[in-house]
Image (tube, rainbow, N blue to C red):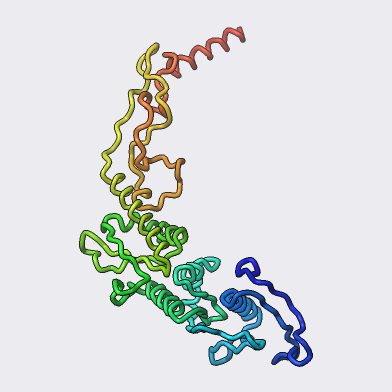
Amino acid sequence: MEEEWGVLMFFAKTGKDGGESRRGDDEQLCIFGPLAARRGAELKTMSAVEHKHPGYCVSSKGELRDVDRVPGDDDEGGWGIDTVPLTDDSFSYALGARGSTRRKLAAASGCIIEYVGRLACFAGYRQDRRRGKDYLRWLLEQRTGQSVVDDPRSRDDCTIVKVPSKSVGFLTGYRGESLRAIEREAGTFMFTDGSGRDGPEENLLIFSFSRRNRDHAAEIVQDRVRHHERVGDRPPMDRGGGYGGPPMGGGGYGGPPMRDNMCWDFQKGRCTRGAMCRFSHGEPPMGGGGYNQGYGGGRGRSRSRSRDRNRDRGRRRRD
């Protein structure tokens, strides 16, 4: 936790006059560092404690309990913490595998987001907390339907990219994995607004507090779309030159295996076989001769003839 937030943490006594806390069996955890780092480590600690001891950091009314602070440890400059209650189903969806969804929303919004029990906590300045809560609301809307963003062009944290409708499935990938990979690489939150599903193009909304991150994500998206257009327009590849022909002939080695059928999963952005895939991913034709794994006639002897000669030699040895 210290490495994650760049703070110094240890348990210590704070003095006779201020060492007693609300609960007699509590210990004092001291967190040293900048304001944002201290609050992030504080919420992370509360999340872990609440998981082990439900009700310790969240009251029965679903409110975050106050923290005993030393003099001078005050929020300043509009800094604060907002909370949003979550149901059991929405909590699992908003958390993601090993907290991946929560980290994605935090990276894109520039807001500290932690889940203390079933309470989503947003720490930061006012505009950061607003972005974090908006992103969480849009994420939860995707569980049951389409996210609705009012006037995205007026937001200073949104970039809109036009994507051909035929490339949306390729860009999204199987179960959204391709789009999630772009989000992780660029530190953004992305989804289509659904406005152009029946038209030739759809609007892809890219959200992030950082203009640089949004531009990076837009470049990746445009590159993926161009790649999909090249793959989709490429005609099937022809085979090489023959199986090898009669004895003493043949088409030579011919290089690596030929793959002339287009991979359907790759076109949809969900092929996980990579170079081991038996179908084409749009690469140029490889090799010239040979039908079976690129092998031609070799030394001009068919497999059956060689097998017959070996059998005859074995018989002569036995005789």
Residue 217 location, quadrant: bottom left
- The image quarter in which residue 67 lies: bottom right
Q: Residue at x 34, y 33 (%)?
A: 285
Q: Is residue 315 visible?
A: yes
Q: Position of residue 102 (x, y in %)?
A: 50, 71
Nearest the camera: 27 or 202?
27
Q: Is residue 177 left or right of residue 49?
A: left
**Left or right: where does residue 201 sit relative to residue 133?**
left
The C terminus lies in quadrant: top right
Residue in view at x 43 percent, y 30 percent: 256
Q: Is residue 51 visible?
A: no
The part of the image, by quadrant, that contains residue 233 is: top left
Front position in the image: 206 or 62:
206
In the rendering, at what x and y percent does residue 6 appear? 62, 68
Residue visible at 30% across and 55% down in the picture: 167
Classify residue 284 as left or right of residue 74. Answer: left
Observer-nearest of 245 and 127:
127
Q: Quadrant of the N terminus?
A: bottom right
Place of residue 305 in the rendered image (x, y in percent of width and height, measured from the top left): 45, 14
Q: Position of residue 107 (x, y in %)?
A: 48, 68
Number of numbered discs overlaid on the protein picture: 0
Instruction: Looking at this view, name the residue that lies furthest to the left.
Output: 199
